Amino acid sequence: MRLKLLLLFILPLLTLAQAQTITNLQLELKKETNSEKKLEIINEMVSIAFEQNMEQALVFAKQGVAFADKVKDKNWQPKFYEMQGRMHANLLQLDSASIFFLKAEKGYSAVNNKEGLAKTYFKMAWVSRKKGNLDTALQKDLEGLKMMESIDNKAGICDAMTRISDDLTQQNRLEEALDYAEKAIAIADKFNLTTEKFYVNFNAANVAMASKKYQQSFSFYDKALSIAKEQNMGLPTYADVSNGRGNALKRLGKNKDALADYQKAMEYAKTANYQNAINTVTANLGEINLILGNYKEALKYQLETVKLQEGSNEKANLVENYHHVSTIYSKLGDYKTALEYKQKAYDLRDRIASIESDAKMSEMLTKYETKKKEETISTQKTTISQQKLIKSLFIGLAVLLLGLLIIGYISYQNRAKKNRLLAIKNAENELLLKEIHHRVKNNLEIVSSLLALQSSQIDDQSTKDAMQESQNRVNSIGIVHQKLYQGSNLGAIEMKDYVLNLSESILDSFGADEKVELELAMEKLDLDIDTAVPLGLIINELITNTVKYAFPNGENGKLTIKLERKANSILQLIVADNGVGKSGVLQGTGFGGQLISLLTHQLNGTMQEQNDNGTIVTFDFKLKKTA
């Protein structure tokens, strides 16, 4: 409340001062006759307006573009193209932003301005990221890094590494993201790059958030906000950092504090007319109100978020927000509408996956055809050279050799054609198999959603628990098919990543992700689907029993899962907790224990259970030998 009153008092004063400064600059612009100085004045007007009102900044940027084009100033033209593109981007007019960034790229290249070119690559990467094209974003940021390194621009190198770290975070490549974040912090500290210190801390906060180190993330956000205010970096920056702080507080369970930070972020964003932040914070206000049980308030924000993202064609987070709307309608008892939005989420995700698959297939075929054409051209050049040499020696021999070459060329073409058709057929079969796994995963998710909706209408707790356990079993199988169609190897599943996803999903379904610490003691291990599915179901049952029985009074605990391949084709699984030491398998209805015994027998395995300072269950499975 104090901050709100302070903003109500200070912001009008800042706006008035800004308006007066801009008015003075406009008067100065009218009097100025030198074209270079006119462009400098317009540039200053854009910078001042950007800190408070982006729509006004866009107007001035357009004015700069028009004047630079009029006087044909080759140095200023790309600068104002970049400025106008930046304003369009922050207003989420992404297609318009891309047009002006391409103009800026062309203009900077013409005058060999490598720093301007690198900064334009960074902004093009941002647009690609908003459109969900994460690979393209990373490629552009890497190009910007190379450009900054070529001119030894320390601030630019630091900026590039921060952006690349963010790209890697978006791709969930967190170890690589942390490596780039630490490099950026080291450069900022070594060369005392004052402005970059804000960005490296802000990025480090994002990486920590993705790594689930929420307290560390909050500390980085808090430090970044202090730096931003010390340097008077403007309302858009305050909005971004306050939103980040709210995210960290939400993950720490401090939901009321998170709501307050989101509300501050919205005040900053609306005052600055910062549409990108308005969209993001609107979504977060919907989610935090959902968590707090303010369902009607949550629905208002979430429907607005969906409307904004549909209008701007921003698909990166639209699937998630469809799911949120479905959940809210379910809480309000409108199950029909809840199921409609759930289906919207699945349909959109399928369309995105289909577009990506088609694009990759097209790219693969284009590369294949290009390579074959290059090989044919190379062969033809060699043939012509040989013909000239042979003709100069002996015409008769030339005719004979030419005949042999033609026969060989025809044979080569026939083989090449067969190989090309075979490669295309193999690619089509692989794509079809991935699509099958994709559809199976979708169907299992619909089954899981139906179980969830049915469970929400049941009052008996034991029945609800049984429904939840059934939902988790369906999810454990669904994750296997998801890994198959997302991975590069259709014949095997990488178990460490699969077990991590499965474990986190189960803990989250029971609300135990903050109470139970998960440790995976395993290296990367590929297993076939016939082994992975029953193994996943066994792990599902053991985690479920741990959550239900190992910590009866709600205390915190630790769950360790170890999976490794021993000698003589033995696969050993160990699941251990530091709970009360009761047998998890023997608790409950008994169905879980029967299922574990059946699956253990199916995998030709044995099971041992110890109850000493917790419960330790050890399995030894005899793997089938494969070629």
Image (cartoon, rainbow, N blue to C red):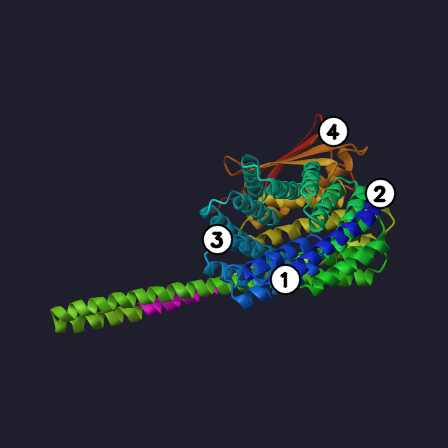
Closest to the observer, 196 or 92: 196
Crowd around label 2: few <14 · some 14–19 · many ≥20 (10 Å): few
Element at label 2: helix
Q: Residue furthest left?
A: 394
Label number found at residue 557: none
Question: What residue is drawn where x is 64% and y is 51%?
Answer: 479
Q: Quadrant of residue 179?
A: top right
Question: What residue is drawn where x is 56% and y is 64%?
Answer: 68
Q: Are marks 1 and 3 in contact (CB under 8 Å)?
A: no
For label 1, the residue is 31
Q: Amino acid at mark 2?
A: Arg
Closest to the observer, 531 or 148: 148
Question: What residue is drawn where x is 47% and y is 46%?
Answer: 149
Element at label 1: helix
Q: Which residues are magenta?
A: 412-425
For label 3, the residue is 114
Q: Amino acid at mark 1?
A: Lys
Crowd around label 1: few <14 · some 14–19 · many ≥20 (10 Å): few
For label 2, the residue is 2
**Mark closest to the chain's N terminus, 1 or 3:** 1
**How far apart in space, not on screen, are marks 2 and 1 (Cα)?**
44 Å
Q: Are marks 2 and 1 in contact (CB under 8 Å)?
A: no
* Prevailing SS of the magenta stretch: helix
Crowd around label 3: few <14 · some 14–19 · many ≥20 (10 Å): some
Q: Quadrant of residue 574?
A: top right
For label 4, the residue is 581
Question: What residue is drawn where x is 80% and y is 63%?
Answer: 337
**How far apart in space, not on screen, are marks 1 and 4 (Cα)?**
85 Å
Element at label 4: loop
Q: Are marks 3 and 4 in contact (CB under 8 Å)?
A: no
